């Protein structure tokens, strides 16, 4: 009996001890949970940070989407590669914007295979395998840029990137410009076929003095149709891309040595990459060493001097393009010169020509007291019934000072 009481006592003590332990455990757990639980202020700022980060990411995605949409839209129209035309009030041609660019578009299927191979081998040997940006070349260019602490050119531009540069007119040697170029190159690559990009590239690139595109280059340097170019002539044109004016055989300086060296370099790249056989390579090199048969073709020249009214229209349109699409002035100017748009102005040519003729009369030119600056004058004629500008003229000793009135 006594033993049973002792056992009961011990069991009661154990039970009490167990309950006490559970209470302490729950209390400790509660404290630990309270420590983990953040204060309302901390929770608020955490949520605010996450929300702000999502807003930034979303805004950046929208920005990239807008820039990509704009570039694709404008580049598609610029692939037309034809001058824009300004018409007067009677729908007569008043000015051709970009007509000073001597160009003649050629279809991809009409471009000699040797010419395509020559450009690809010397400019972008992995053109048909990358997605607009050559990661290997780009990585090497970035490494070089870092090693030289920003004092070297990025380089590594693919054919697609070169086309972007020709469209936007931006060739600044900055990291931000290069990043934009990569982005635009990817847009082109996923929007057009490799053949479409090459066709635009061959029609738009600068190839000589006021010469754009390989078709005009064939006429200018060899007085030939592009389909009649031989292997070494194709290699010469591809080598021009490095610096067209430096390899111009019609310049005052003798460029024979530079031309020979550069053309042989292109031919070797074509042979090394398997585009031509060893016999073709040796025969072409022999011909280059003998001398290429240059023959200057007849290239029509256009004047880019416009009337004051046309200048005002051009400036206004370029400004509108900049504001509408958030692009640079160079990009807007290139677009206007390549897109082949039609602009209908309100100018009356008869009135405009008479006013400009009158403004040239010397009786209106008054000398200033210092004897260097002439007087300035301006006239704007507006039809009160339509409120349209029929004439705009400005007389200044510096025409570039013309401003919208």
Image (spheres, grey):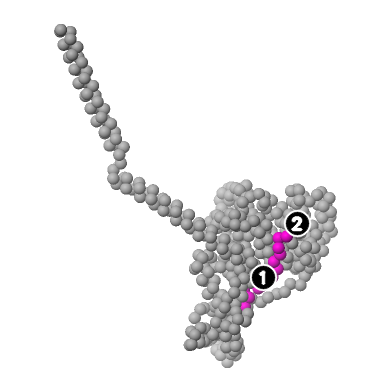
Query: What residue is drawn where x is 41% and y is 53%?
Result: 55
Location of mark 1 (residue): 101
State the CA–CA distance, disc 2 to disc 1: 25 Å
Disc 2 secondary structure class: helix
Q: Quadrant of residue 82?
A: bottom right
Disc 1 secondary structure class: loop
Judging depth in this view, the residue of 211 and 200 nearest the camera is 200
Image side of residue 147 versus residue 8, left or right:
right
Image side of residue 201 versus residue 229, left or right:
left
Judging depth in this view, the residue of 160 and 303 nearest the camera is 160
Query: What residue is drawn where x is 63% and y is 80%?
Result: 93
**Relative height, residue 217 to residue 159 (above, below):** below
Judging depth in this view, the residue of 201 and 148 nearest the camera is 201
Mark number displayed over residue 56: none
Task: Answer few, some or many: residues within 10 Å of disc 2's Cα (few below 14, many 20 plus, some between 14 and 19).
Answer: some
Quadrant the N terminus occupies: top left
Image side of residue 240 versus residue 133, left or right:
right
Residue 141 in magenta stretch: no
**Relative height, residue 350 to residue 41 (above, below):** below
Residue 288 x/y as whole percent: 81, 58
Residue 386 visible: yes
Residue 395 visible: no
Residue 234 x/y as whole percent: 76, 59
Residue 157 x/y as whole percent: 63, 54
Query: What residue is drawn where x is 56% and y is 79%?
Result: 345
The overriding secondary structure of the stretch rendered in magenta is loop
Q: Quadrant of residue 291?
A: bottom right
Location of mark 2 (residue): 113
Residue 98 in magenta stretch: yes
Residue 107 x/y as whole percent: 71, 63
Q: Say whether disc 2 or disc 1 marks the residue closer to the N-terminus.
A: 1
Magenta residues span 94-109
């Amino acid at each position: 009996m006594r033993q049973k009481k002792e056992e009961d006592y011990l069991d009661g003590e154990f039970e009490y001890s167990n309950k006490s332990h559970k209470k302490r455990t729950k209390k400790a757990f509660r404290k630990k949970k309270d420590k983990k639980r953040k204060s309302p202020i901390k929770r608020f700022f955490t949520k605010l940070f996450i929300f702000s980060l999502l807003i930034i990411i979303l805004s950046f995605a929208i920005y990239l989407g807008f820039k990509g949409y704009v570039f694709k839209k404008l580049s598609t129209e610029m692939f037309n590669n034809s001058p824009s035309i300004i018409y007067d009030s009677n729908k007569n041609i008043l000015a051709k914007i970009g007509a000073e660019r001597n160009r003649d578009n050629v279809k991809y299927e009409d471009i000699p295979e040797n010419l395509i191979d020559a450009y690809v081998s010397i400019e972008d040997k992995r053109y048909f395998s990358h997605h607009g940006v050559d990661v290997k070349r780009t990585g090497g260019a970035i490494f070089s840029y870092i090693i030289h602490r920003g004092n070297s050119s990025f380089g590594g531009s693919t054919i697609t990137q070169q086309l972007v540069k020709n469209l936007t007119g931006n060739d600044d040697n900055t990291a931000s410009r290069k990043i934009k170029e990569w982005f635009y190159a990817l847009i082109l690559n996923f929007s057009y076929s490799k053949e479409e990009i090459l066709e635009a590239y061959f029609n738009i690139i600068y190839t000589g003095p006021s010469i754009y595109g390989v078709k005009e280059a064939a006429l200018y340097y060899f007085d030939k149709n592009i389909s009649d170019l031989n292997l070494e002539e194709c290699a010469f044109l591809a080598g021009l891309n490095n610096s067209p004016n430096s390899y111009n055989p019609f310049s005052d300086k003798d460029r024979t040595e530079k031309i020979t060296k550069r053309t042989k370099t292109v031919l070797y790249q074509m042979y090394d990459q398997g585009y031509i056989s060893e016999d073709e390579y040796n025969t072409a090199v022999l011909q280059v060493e003998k001398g290429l048969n240059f023959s200057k073709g007849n290239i029509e020249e256009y004047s880019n001097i416009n009337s004051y009214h046309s200048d005002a229209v051009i400036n206004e349109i370029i400004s509108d393009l900049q504001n509408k699409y958030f692009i640079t002035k160079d990009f807007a100017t290139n677009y206007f010169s390549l897109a082949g748009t039609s602009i209908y102005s309100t100018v009356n040519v008869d009135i405009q020509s008479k006013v400009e003729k009158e403004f040239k009369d010397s009786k209106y030119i008054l000398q200033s007291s210092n004897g260097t600056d002439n007087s300035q004058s301006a006239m704007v004629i507006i039809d009160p019934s339509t409120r349209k500008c029929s004439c705009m003229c400005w007389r200044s000793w510096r025409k570039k000072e013309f401003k919208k009135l």
